């Protein structure tokens, strides 16, 4: 029992002699200051605004068609009304699908850019850790 206690004490003493340096990294602060992260954020904002404008144009065009339909629906036959309503519903679904696809595309691009930035940051941290022990 004494031998086991002595062996554990020796291991503890030896392991404490090999000191490891520990560094804490504030990733949030790195993202705030890292130029590539700032550039990526600006790119994503610009792309998002561009896509939003395109979708808003589609919606405005759709709304105009709906208003035209509503103003002329009293003169249309039942068959023409039904056909026009189906066209409008199809167009509305296409706009919604396009909006969802744009959202997914933006999420994928954002994830890819952030993954690349994370790799760059991790690489820099690894290099710094290797050079500074």
Image (cartoon, grey):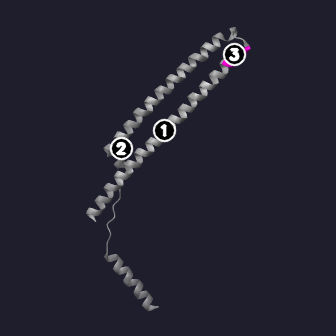
Q: Nearer the observer, disc 2 or disc 1?
A: 1
* Residue 121, horizontal then vertical, whole percent: 34, 52
Q: Residue at label 3?
A: 81
Examine the rendered structure and indicate whether residue 120 appears above or below residue 13.
above
Residue sitting at 52 percent across and 23 percent down?
58
- Hey, which residue is sitting farthest left in the picture? 131
Helix, strand or loop for disc 2 = helix
Residue sitting at 70 percent across and 18 percent down?
82
* Residue 62, horizontal then vertical, whole percent: 57, 20
Spatial CA distance of label 2 from label 1 is 19 Å
Q: Dot 2, how many residues are within 10 Å of its Cα: few (below 14), some (14-19), or many (20+)?
A: some
Residue sitting at 47 percent across and 91 percent down?
1
* Residue 108, horizontal then vertical, whole percent: 47, 42
Ranked by sequence position, the earlier of labels 3 and 2 is 2
Predominant secondary structure, magenta span? helix
Q: Is the residue under label 2 in contact with that under label 3 (CB below 8 Å)? A: no
Q: Dot 1, how many residues are within 10 Å of its Cα: few (below 14), some (14-19), or many (20+)?
A: few
Q: Residue at label 2?
A: 37
Please tell me in which quadrant of the rendered image residue 66 appears. top right
User: In front: 130, or 8?
Assistant: 130
- Hey, which residue is sitting farthest top in the picture? 75
Ranked by sequence position, the earlier of labels 2 and 1 is 2
Examine the rendered structure and indicate whether residue 78 appears above or below residue 25.
above
Q: Is the residue under label 3 in contact with that under label 1 (CB below 8 Å)? A: no
Ranked by sequence position, the earlier of labels 1 and 3 is 3
Boundaries of the magenta span: 78-83
Q: Residue at label 1?
A: 105
């Amino acid at each position: 029992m004494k031998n086991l206690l002595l062996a554990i004490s020796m291991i503890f003493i030896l392991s404490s002699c090999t000191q490891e340096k520990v560094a804490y990294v504030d990733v949030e602060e790195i993202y705030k200051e890292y130029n590539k992260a700032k550039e990526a954020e600006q790119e994503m904002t610009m792309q998002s605004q561009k896509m939003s404008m395109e979708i808003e144009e589609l919606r405005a065009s759709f709304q105009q068609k709906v208003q035209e339909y509503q103003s002329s629906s009293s003169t249309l036959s039942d068959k023409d009304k039904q056909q026009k309503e189906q066209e409008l519903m199809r167009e509305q679904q296409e706009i919604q699908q396009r909006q969802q696809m744009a959202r997914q595309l933006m999420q994928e691009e954002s994830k890819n850019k952030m993954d690349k930035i994370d790799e760059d940051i991790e690489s820099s941290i690894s290099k710094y850790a290797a050079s500074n022990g």
